[in-house]
Image: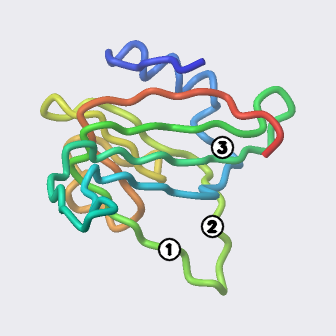
């Protein structure tokens, strides 16, 4: 069951629930644009879905995995970690900025320094999440 996060209070409560994503990893990303070519080769070229799903795994027995769904994606910055370093998330940030939900894989980032951050980050019109079993 999906839970929508709309307010700063809901975002803060969620971050407390997931311990700021401490000891987590971003396992998978999946993007659906909405554009397609049908079986008759007719093209529907509109990016009208712009939906990003993010699978996070955690070192937590009560909720070992969860999925974030960002709808109305405005921005995705993906900076994969160099293979000679670890890629665990020690702390993340989640906040509202100019009416958008923003998430990044560093807890020291906020609306004031988000544009300068050089890590993985997402901005979208809305966010919902759900726990995932058996991943």
* Rendered view: 131 above or below 51: above
What separation in Å lies between label 1 and label 3 (alpha carbons)?
A: 18 Å
Q: Earlier in the sequence, mark 3 or mark 2?
A: 3
Crowding near pointer 2: few (<14 within 10 Å), some, many (20+)? some
* Rendered view: 20 above or below 105: above
Dividing the picture into quarters, in which one does residue 130 lie? top right
Residue receiving disc 2: 87
Residue 96 place in picture, x, y as percent: 26, 30
- SS for callout 3: loop
Q: Earlier in the sequence, mark 1 or mark 3?
A: 3
Mark 1 or 3: the one toward you: 1
Q: Which mark is residue 17?
A: none
Q: Earlier in the sequence, mark 1 or mark 2?
A: 1
Residue furthest front in the image: 40
Crowding near pointer 3: few (<14 within 10 Å), some, many (20+)? some
- Position of residue 92 in the picture relative to residue 99 (left or right): right
Badges 1 and 2: C-beta atoms under 8 Å apart? yes
Residue receiving disc 1: 80
- Position of residue 15 in the picture relative to residue 37 (left or right): right
Quadrant location, the N terminus: top right
- SS for callout 2: loop
- Position of residue 22 in the picture relative to residue 98 (left or right): right
Crowding near pointer 1: few (<14 within 10 Å), some, many (20+)? few
Residue receiving disc 3: 22
Instruction: Kindly identify the residue that appears in the image at 41 percent across and 50 percent down.
Output: 104
- SS for callout 1: loop
Residue 60 place in picture, x, y as percent: 81, 36
* Rendered view: 42 above or below 102: below
What separation in Å lies between label 1 and label 2 (alpha carbons)?
A: 8 Å
Badges 3 and 2: C-beta atoms under 8 Å apart? no
């Amino acid at each position: 069951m999906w839970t929508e996060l709309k307010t700063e209070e809901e975002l803060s409560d969620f971050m407390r629930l997931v311990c700021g994503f401490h000891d987590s990893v971003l396992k998978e990303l999946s993007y659906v644009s909405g554009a397609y070519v049908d079986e008759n080769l007719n093209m529907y070229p509109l990016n009208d879905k712009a939906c990003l799903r993010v699978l996070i795994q955690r070192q937590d027995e009560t909720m070992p995995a969860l999925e974030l769904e960002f709808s109305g994606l405005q921005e995705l910055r993906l900076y994969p970690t160099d293979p000679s370093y670890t890629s665990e998330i020690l702390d993340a940030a989640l906040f509202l900025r100019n009416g958008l939900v923003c998430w990044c894989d560093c807890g020291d980032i906020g609306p004031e320094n988000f544009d300068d951050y050089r890590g993985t980050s997402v901005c979208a019109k809305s966010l919902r999440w759900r726990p995932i079993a058996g991943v």
